[in-house]
Amino acid sequence: MESWVLERLQEFVGRNDRVALEPRVQQGLTFQSMAGQSSYRVTGNLPSLGRGLVVTEEGVVPDYARVRRVFHLTNAITKYYYSPFYLEAQVPGYHARVAWLGGRPVGFTRDGRYCAFTTDRAPDFIPLSFFEQNPRLVVCLTIEGRGIPYAKPSYRGEVEDVVAWGTDLLEQGVREPLEAARRYELFVQHGIRGTDYAGPFEAADRDAILAWMKEQEASGAGGIVLKPSERHHRPLKYALPSALRHAAPAWLALDQKIDEDPCLGRLLQAACAATEVGVPPGGWDWEAIGRALLDEIAEAVRTVGEGGTLIRQHSVWLHAREAAAALIEQLQDGTTGAAIRELELVEEKGGWRLRFERRFDEATAALQRRLSGASYRD
């Protein structure tokens, strides 16, 4: 391991954490490279070094702040916050960080892997003028649309290609995100699309907070993220009742264990949120909720029952041809429980259209066993 890795991390952690840093680094970091850029990523939660943190020769790209979930927002505010804060609409999609490294924007996934797709498309989301003026800042994006490579599009999947929202600004070598107000200012200045937000609020502004929450629920937003005005406070997240309908298609994670059931937790979140924003049980669209809960699972079972295999096809557009090969390689390396297969790569609109599929053999086999009549211990 190069000497600069330990040097960068010693600059990042506090004085007390430097004593036992070297043995932790030797055990918890993984080397990676892409297109001549190399780095190390933290693959587990180490003391003072969170999973997904990336160490480069230029500096440390911090991991995402750990966001705790609350089931009652206005009560949580009085419990955890003593300074002004902002409320932001939670947007669907996958998370990526874009840092300025080696004179170009480089994208990383939430777990710290290189992201060829985000790297290739970053100039479409972030003007280069931003990094020219702020080379040490890291833009956190949530990316969604039909043309994303990582997941099935959620309820905002009507977007033709991709859309990205800026959700945070990190600073190389600094653990805490930039202050929310400064982030809003920089996003507007450089034309980076941000999420809907309101504030600043105080804990006493309960009526105004509830009114904004109800507006978000009526608009179909899935949730709210509470962002502090000061760096040392941690954000909180909160699911709105509408998340029960809109987020359900993403619950069936075919590349995970099929016995892992997230439905009960989602139902409890929705019920608590409905109580807070004043939605009685009689006011719920039970038909829409039932379809959201069952359609995806029922379709998967039908496919396997008819002798098929669970497959999802993806179509993404990229500027550079070499980004397509890097993306396929990264997907094959980072995907568990599924196989990645390239279907087609053709020139399109001055770039390249890559089509590939995910084949979920493990999930298919799990459903086949159940449909065969095998017995299971509850």
Image (spheres, helix red, strand yellow):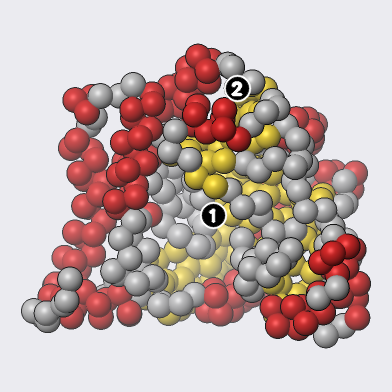
Q: In this picture, is 23 found above or below 51? A: below
Q: Position of residue 95 (x, y in %)?
A: 59, 54
Residue that appears at 41% across and 34% down: 240
Horizontal relation, residue 202 to residue 354: left or right: right
Q: In this picture, is 361 found above or below 324? A: below
| Residue 131 visible to an observer of this rendering | yes
Horizontal relation, residue 14 to residue 290: left or right: right
Q: Which residue is mark 2?
A: 203
Nearer to me, 25 or 108: 25
Residue type indicated by callout 2: Ala
Rounded to the nearest angstrom, the CA distance separating label 2 from label 1 is 31 Å
Mark 2 surroundings within 10 Å by alpha-carbon count, few (fewer than 14), some (14 through 19), many (20 or more): some
Q: Position of residue 119 (x, y in %)?
A: 70, 61
Residue that appears at 78% across and 82% down: 23
The label number, if any, that marks residue 94 in the structure image: 1
N-terminal of the pair, mark 2 or mark 1, is 1
Residue that appears at 85% across and 73% down: 19
